[in-house]
Amino acid sequence: MGLTKSSTGTRLLSENFKDLKNKKGYTIALAGNPNVGKSTIFNSLTGMHQHTGNWPGKTVANAMGECLYKNQSFLFVDIPGTYSIMSSSEEEEIARDYICFGKPDATVIVIDATCLERNLNLVFQTMEITNNIIVCVNLLDEAKKKKIKIDLNKLSKELGVPVVGTIARNKKTLKNLMDIILKVCKKEIIPSPNKIIYKPIIENSISSLEIVLKDTLTLPNYLLRWISLKILDGEEKILNSIEKNFSISIVNNREIQEVRNTILKNLEKNKIYCENFRDNIVSTIVNNSEIICKKVCTFEVSNYSR
Ligand SMILES: Nc1nc2c(ncn2[C@@H]2O[C@H](COP(=O)(O)OP(=O)(O)OP(=O)(O)O)[C@@H](O)[C@H]2O)c(=O)[nH]1
Ligand SMILES: [Mg+2]
């Protein structure tokens, strides 16, 4: 079976997530690691309007709530906290599938200012599946107590996406967040994520598969790149989701599998095997997070003369 164009994929996708899409307003996903303040922000913005919905075919419930800001209606979706969207736990699957296939108008990734480095891993992973990202650096009060200072402008430049600092209980800081969300939704600000660049051998492998996919699948380049990476990785659940939502056959597509096998043989010659492929990907992401954290974080030295 060959690949199919994505027009039907788009239709299937909107059917799958139609109960989650707010026709009138913008839809905003709130993502992030566990315990970073997503629900606090969600509750503060949506007040008493929130309600809970079930994800198609899933048992985990998600909170959804409306918010009116500057005469514009927003539907916020508080997705489960996860450290990663790479594996197949139910939470990770839900987070990944909603951000990628649910097509929210913007995804706000809430991160903990007191452990920026660990939180950036999820930011980089998410930047592979969507461009419309806003990073919300929350818990700035806790960071201040720990004398951690983050250069938010620099972080924004390093990531290529808007960055807003918040203290979830402080409404004024949430107003700044809403202003940026509105601008991204209205396309007055267009985030342009600086995606992770992997080792040359892995980059070449991704490119070879991208060429095969490009011929038959009409999707933005960043998604072709991500799908190529997942085909190489071979994680079944992710591939099943991609197949279903983009109406594409991967596992049974002979051309894709032939190219994949050739690439894997070449990777093996370079000591990258199926078993350590993902480790390679993860370590590049972790290294990048560390480098950026070092560039934007300073730990104030206490002033003893005071
Ligand atoms: N000091 C401080 N506490 C905060 C802030 N934001 C959230 N909290 C607290 O942090 C804890 C976790 O907040 P939640 O909103 O439940 O975090 P979450 O990201 O929804 O967590 P999960 O749903 O488990 O992923 C709560 O006790 C909040 O009151 C903040 O900006 N400053
Ligand atoms: Mg929560």
Image: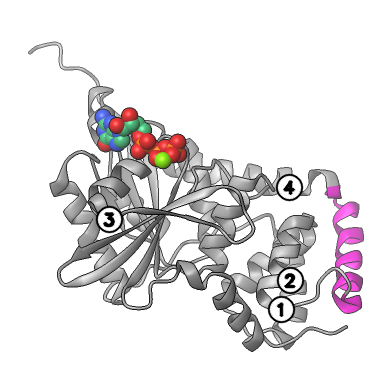
Q: Is residue 263 left or right of residue 167?
A: right
On the image, the x and y values in percent for residue 50 come to 32, 53
Residue 259 is covered by the magenta coloring? yes
Residue density around tag 1, few if under 14, some if 14–19, many if 20 or more, within 10 Å = many
Q: CA distance from mark 1 to mark 3?
A: 35 Å
Tag 3's secondary structure? helix
Q: CA distance from mark 2 to mark 1?
A: 5 Å
Looking at marks 2 and 4 on the same chain, the residue that comes earlier in the sequence is marked by: 2
Please report contact status of discs 2 and 1: CB closer than 8 Å, yes or no.
yes
Residue pictured at 64% horizontal, 65% vertical = 226
Q: Quadrant of the C terminus?
A: top left
Query: Which residue is identified by label 4?
Result: 278
In which of the image's four quarters is ligand 1 placed?
A: top left
- Mark 2 CB lies closer than 8 A to ligand 1: no
Frontmost of labels 3 and 4 is 3
Query: Which residue is identified by label 3?
Result: 49
**Stretch in magenta:** 253-274
Q: CA distance from mark 2 to mark 4?
A: 20 Å
Query: Which residue is identified by label 1?
Result: 247
Q: Amino acid at mark 1?
A: Ser
Q: Amino acid at mark 4?
A: Arg
Vertical order, 18 against 235 (above or below): below
Q: Amino acid at mark 2?
A: Glu
- Label number found at residue 27: none
Tag 4's secondary structure? helix
Please report contact status of discs 4 and 1: CB closer than 8 Å, yes or no.
no
Q: Quadrant of residue 142?
A: top left
Q: Most prominent secondary structure in the magenta stretch?
A: helix
